[in-house]
């Protein structure tokens, strides 16, 4: 009877072309889980995402040796988003833990995340190397800077306290994540989960984590699964935009409006200065202000052109900001409603 009191956890391992590290790292995870067998019942689920090397063959061999390890093969590469969705749908555990097969986050993060989820009744627990207490070791400089700034931009855009939006290493409460309607097929799946979890007012907790590439760097040239830096940067920027598109429109519109006001006020000040000179010299004319304005136009036609175009562009961006705010509110409400319907009408286990 004691075994039934243990928390049942599923470890999800997305895998694409990882023959160089798959067997050793799965063995390390299984060994770690065996050391926690009094605390957790567990399974390991390998998602072989259409690997072109021997990863599928190696995964099958691992499963034959240990029936607590399962593998699901995608017939072709469907990318990380589909791999995670396959893992979520086929896991049996109460808590689902996603790890990177390269173990850049060591296996002991499993216990930390699961215990935090149980203690806080969280729906998602995120391993964050960028929060206080987190640590980064041996990550290439360009990749680390890109990741830090993309996550910082997402934090600003989302206006939430979280430090890591793009990280894959997380724990999910199964009943929650299965009811989140996910569409992204690629690396943007992780920010998408965060975005939709925030719409649903899910409880999201971060824990300090250690991102360590010491072992991963030994396999440079032998692994083909790592994401390119520029692709990751573009993906992160687009994800940040999706969190609050109106923030970017209003910000850009505000900057353009400030620039246009500077031009317009400068022209107005110069026009009034010329007008005061006309009055001081007692020059008699029918329309002194129009004359002063025309004089400014002859002197600085480019200022009128730039100021006018900038003002119109500012109005356009501010309008897009208000429209996108309205659209986001509609989307949030519809997504919340759709998720509630899915939860209430979905299959019961």
Image: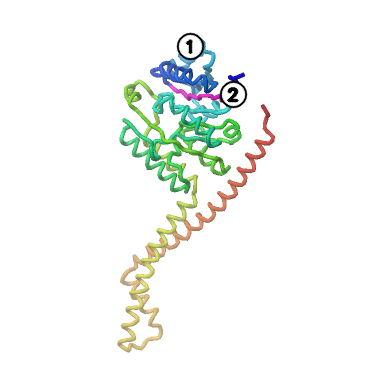
- Image quadrant holding the C terminus, namely top right
User: Looking at this view, is 244 or 129 the one in front?
Assistant: 129
On screen, residue 188 versus residue 142, left or right, reads right
Measured as percent of width and height from the top left, residue 134 is found at: 38, 36
Measured as percent of width and height from the top left, residue 132 is found at: 39, 40
For residue 241, above or below residue 107: below
Measured as percent of width and height from the top left, residue 340 is found at: 65, 40
Q: Residue at x 37, y 73 (%)?
A: 268
For residue 17, above or below residue 141: above
Q: Residue at x 49, y 45 (%)?
A: 243
Instruction: Determine contact: label 1, label 2, CB under 8 Å.
Output: no
Residue 264 visible, this orientation:
yes
Question: Residue beneath label 2, please?
Answer: 5
Q: Residue at x 57, y 50 (%)?
A: 327
- Find out whether residue 12 is within the magenta segment: yes
Query: 10 Å neighbourhood of mark 2: few (<14), some, or many (≥20)?
Result: few
Q: Residue at x 39, y 24 (%)?
A: 224
Checking the image for residue 61, the label placed there is 1
Q: Which residues are magenta?
A: 7-16
Query: 10 Å neighbourhood of mark 1: few (<14), some, or many (≥20)?
Result: few
């Amino acid at each position: 009877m004691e075994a039934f009191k243990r928390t049942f956890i599923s470890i999800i391992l997305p895998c694409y072309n990882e023959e160089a590290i798959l067997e050793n790292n799965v063995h390390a995870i299984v060994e770690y889980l065996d050391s926690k067998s009094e605390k957790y019942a567990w399974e390991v689920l390998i998602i072989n995402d259409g690997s072109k090397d021997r990863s599928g063959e190696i995964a099958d061999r691992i499963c034959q040796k240990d029936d607590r390890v399962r593998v699901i093969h995608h017939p072709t590469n469907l990318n990380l988003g589909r791999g995670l969705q396959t893992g979520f749908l086929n896991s049996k555990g109460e808590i689902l833990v996603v790890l990177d097969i390269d173990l850049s986050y060591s296996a002991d993060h499993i216990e930390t995340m699961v215990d935090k989820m149980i203690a806080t009744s969280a729906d998602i627990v995120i391993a964050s190397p960028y929060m206080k207490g987190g640590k980064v070791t041996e990550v290439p400089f360009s990749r680390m800077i890109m990741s830090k700034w993309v996550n910082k931009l997402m934090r600003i855009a989302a206006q939430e306290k979280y430090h890591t939006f793009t990280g894959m290493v997380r724990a999910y409460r199964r009943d929650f994540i299965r009811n989140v309607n996910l569409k992204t097929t690629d690396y943007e799946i992780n920010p998408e989960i965060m975005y939709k979890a925030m719409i649903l007012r899910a409880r999201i907790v971060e824990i300090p984590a250690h991102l360590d590439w010491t072992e991963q760097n030994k396999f440079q040239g032998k692994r083909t699964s790592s994401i390119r830096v520029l692709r990751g940067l573009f993906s992160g920027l687009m994800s940040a935009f999706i969190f609050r598109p109106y923030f970017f429109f209003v910000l850009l519109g505000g900057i353009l409006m400030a620039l246009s006001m500077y031009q317009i006020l400068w022209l107005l000040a110069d026009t009034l200065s010329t007008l005061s000179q006309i009055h001081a010299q007692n020059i008699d004319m029918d329309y002194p202000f129009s004359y002063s304005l025309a004089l400014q136009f002859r002197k600085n036609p480019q200022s009128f052109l730039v100021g006018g175009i900038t003002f119109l562009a500012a109005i356009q961006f501010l309008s897009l900001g208000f429209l996108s705010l309205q659209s986001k509110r509609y989307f949030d409400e519809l997504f919340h409603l759709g998720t509630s319907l899915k939860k209430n009408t979905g299959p019961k286990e």
